Image: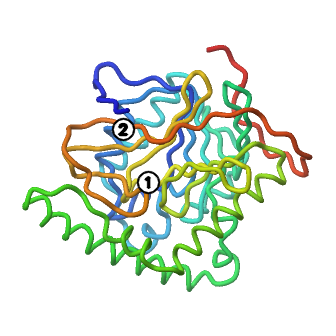
Amino acid sequence: MGYILNRRRPMHYRSIWISDLHLGSRHARTGEVLDFLRSVECRHLYLVGDIVDGWELRRRWQWDDEANTVVQKILRKNRKETKITYLYGNHDEFLLRFAGLNLGGLRLAERVVHETADGRRFLVLHGHQLDGLVHFNRLLERVGSRLYGGILDFNLYFNRIRRRAGFGYWSVSAFLKYQAKSAVRYVTQFEEGMVKLAAGSGVDGVICGHIHRAEMRQVQGMEYLNCGDWVESCTALAEHWDGSIELLRWHEDRVCGAGGGTGAHDAGPGGAGLVSAARSRGGGRGGGQTRQPELAGLFRDSV
């Protein structure tokens, strides 16, 4: 199923999750982010970490007017009674000192629980909490981040050539990640670790970001949902008013495609729009609750 969005009549969702915008880095797709935000409205908006790239800004200041516009657009949604929750990640960990604060309606937290319209409960957090490199070898993690940035630089020039030849977007970094056995093993371990973390909170599933791989699937009997990123795949998760959740892939002029499935692929023809992927829906799950994260918003509000 596909959605072609009318800019004058945005799609309305109950909740939206986006992560890894990396505003302030040269790879941030601020134009696509702005188009997406203008094309959707929602009651709950979750910013699932690495929205601002503090690492890159400390190394080289690259904040521009478009990044300002993205922030202004988010705050404008807040003024329209959208409940906004910001879950900090590893690249915007400087916000840690403000966790728990409510800044004009925008809440800052490390993790929260979201309850869908059909009664399911999801632990929402960025996902860097499982990355041992964050805790034990920050230098190695930053070296990996630099290498990833170099691959994205090559990806940018490579896709300029592809566009001139009439081809759609193709992610070099996604291809390399899917070819590397160690990367595949890391993704698998990450997914399993996230659902184990969620199980300890007595919820039905987990929603996260961090690894720049959009996904919706069952892992060890729990729902694992990853909203992807906005430096490559340009994806988001959206909850409909009946509680079902979909993975949205943003496409614009065949340039910004989603690297999902078994590897990166051409975006294919078509204009700007949202293409829906798998839909998540299911009943509640019991379980002992060992830790109660902060509750996000007014969950059982009327639709």
Q: Position of residue 231 (x, y in %)?
A: 37, 59
Residue furthest left as drawn: 165
Residue at 84% over, 54% down: 200
Residue at 42% over, 47% down: 235
Q: Amino acid at mark 2?
A: Val
Q: Against 10, is 193 above or below?
A: below
Residue at 69% over, 18% down: 301
Mark 1 lies on a secondary structure that is loop
Q: In the rendered image, which quarter contains the N terminus?
A: top left
Q: Does residue 276 appear to the left or right of 116 in the view shown? A: left
Residue at 45% over, 30% down: 76
Q: Quadrant of residue 271?
A: top left
Q: Quadrant of residue 153?
A: bottom left
Whether pointer 2 and pointer 1 mark residues with C-beta atoms closer than 8 Å, the reply is: no
Q: Position of residue 40 (x, y in %)?
A: 41, 29
Q: How many marks?
A: 2
Q: Position of residue 268 (x, y in %)?
A: 22, 49
Mark 2 lies on a secondary structure that is strand
Q: Which residue is mark 2?
A: 275
Badge 1 local density, few (<14 within 10 Å), some, or many (20+)?
many
Q: Amino acid at mark 1?
A: Leu
Foreground label between 2 and 1: 2
Of 38 and 190, nearer the camera is 190
Q: Against 144, is 214 above or below?
A: above
Residue furthest top as drawn: 302
CA distance for labels 2 and 1: 19 Å
Q: Position of residue 159 (x, y in %)?
A: 20, 64
2 or 1: tag closer to the N-terminus: 1
Q: Which residue is mark 1?
A: 21
Q: Does residue 235 appear to the left or right of 27 in the view shown? A: right
